[in-house]
Image (tube, helix red, strand yellow):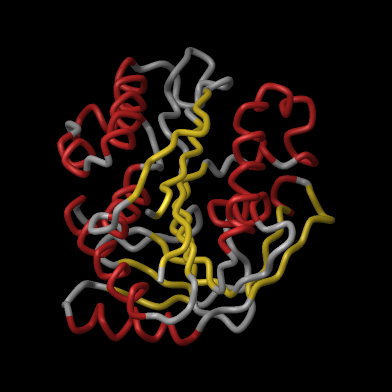
């Protein structure tokens, strides 16, 4: 059963040892992540299914990382001391793999001990007191409707499980919200972020599906695909969406949202 659902940013700047003096510009996001951490702890998950990717993505297939142990670390950002370890939930992983095969959804297994920061940042910020088992999933290069369909498949497997399962989808919104943004300024960036906020408010898959492809490319984002999977997971559930914070101090949109299961 699903016990928790949320969308988070995954900027390494949210980690004290990496963000340093930039932390003070991320106060809203950090406070929202702390609130989300408290909510996650109260939900008492046995498993966290995390959807994100910044290390590997297959153009034509969704990916599940299966390894006997996962490690969260941030060496590439100069932090040599932070480290967390997780173990997989083999039962849920096996169920997802089997069902994807039945539904002819392209799906592959990878095996990496080290989790990329797309997974690592939210796991580090949200799991200070709990250590559930982990199911790390990467989105694909397939079309948007396939991401929703894959999310619905995941929901079937979650609902069939007797374990308490938390779902965390992670990504940063537009990277082109100001002249000093990583991708420079494009007006499509704000259009995209506004669309995401409206989609969350109304739990609207159609808004996520209808945003123009050309404008999407100019928005320079890494949030849409994980959010489509998340919306597929919660599509048939009664939920109340709550936007905990949104800010863009560095020209990149950081969103924290929770979907309360009713």
Measured as percent of width and height from the top left, residue 209 is found at 18, 42
Asked if residue 16 lies left or right of residue 30, the reply is right
Residue 64, quarter of picture: bottom left
Measured as percent of width and height from the top left, residue 56 is found at 45, 61
Asked if residue 148 lies left or right of residue 26, the reply is left
Q: Report the quarter where the N terminus lies.
A: bottom left
Which residue of the protein is positioned furthest toward the top in this rendering? 179
Between 8 and 146, the residue placed more toward the observer is: 8
Name the residue at 28% across, 67% down: 61
Name the residue at 67% across, 26% down: 27
Measured as percent of width and height from the top left, residue 53 is found at 46, 55
Measured as percent of width and height from the top left, residue 191 is found at 29, 21
Q: Report the quarter where the C terminus lies.
A: bottom left
Between 240 and 130, the residue placed more toward the observer is: 240
Asked if residue 114 lies left or right of residue 167, the reply is right
Asked if residue 11 lies left or right of residue 73, the reply is left
Name the residue at 79% across, 56% down: 82
Which residue of the protein is positioned furthest toward the right in this rendering? 81
Picture layout, residue 139 above or below residue 256 = below
Name the residue at 16% across, 77% down: 104
Picture layout, residue 70 above or below residue 80 = below
């Amino acid at each position: 059963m699903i016990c928790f659902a949320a969308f988070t940013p995954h900027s390494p700047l949210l980690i004290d040892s990496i963000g340093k003096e930039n932390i003070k510009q991320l106060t809203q996001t950090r406070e929202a992540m702390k609130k989300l951490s408290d909510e996650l702890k109260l939900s008492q998950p046995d498993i966290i299914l995390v959807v994100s990717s910044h290390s590997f993505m297959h153009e034509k297939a969704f990916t599940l990382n299966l390894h006997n142990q996962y490690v969260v670390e941030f060496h590439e950002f100069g932090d040599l001391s932070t480290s967390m370890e997780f173990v997989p939930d083999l039962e849920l992983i096996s169920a997802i793999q089997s069902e994807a095969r039945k539904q002819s959804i392209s799906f592959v297994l990878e095996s990496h001990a080290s989790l990329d920061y797309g997974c690592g940042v939210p796991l580090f910020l949200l799991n200070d007191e709990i250590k559930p088992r982990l199911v790390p999933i990467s989105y694909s290069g397939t079309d948007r409707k396939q991401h929703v369909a894959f999310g619905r498949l995941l929901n079937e497997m979650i609902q069939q499980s007797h374990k308490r399962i938390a779902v965390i989808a992670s990504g940063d919104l537009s990277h082109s919200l100001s002249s000093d943004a990583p991708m420079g300024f494009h007006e499509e960036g704000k259009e995209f972020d506004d669309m995401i906020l409206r989609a969350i408010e109304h739990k609207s898959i159609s808004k996520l599906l209808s945003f123009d492809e050309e404008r999407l490319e100019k928005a320079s984002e890494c949030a849409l695909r994980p959010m489509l999977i998340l919306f597929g997971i919660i599509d048939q559930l009664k939920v109340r969406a709550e936007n905990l914070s949104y800010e863009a101090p560095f020209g990149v949109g950081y969103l924290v949202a929770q979907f309360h299961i009713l």
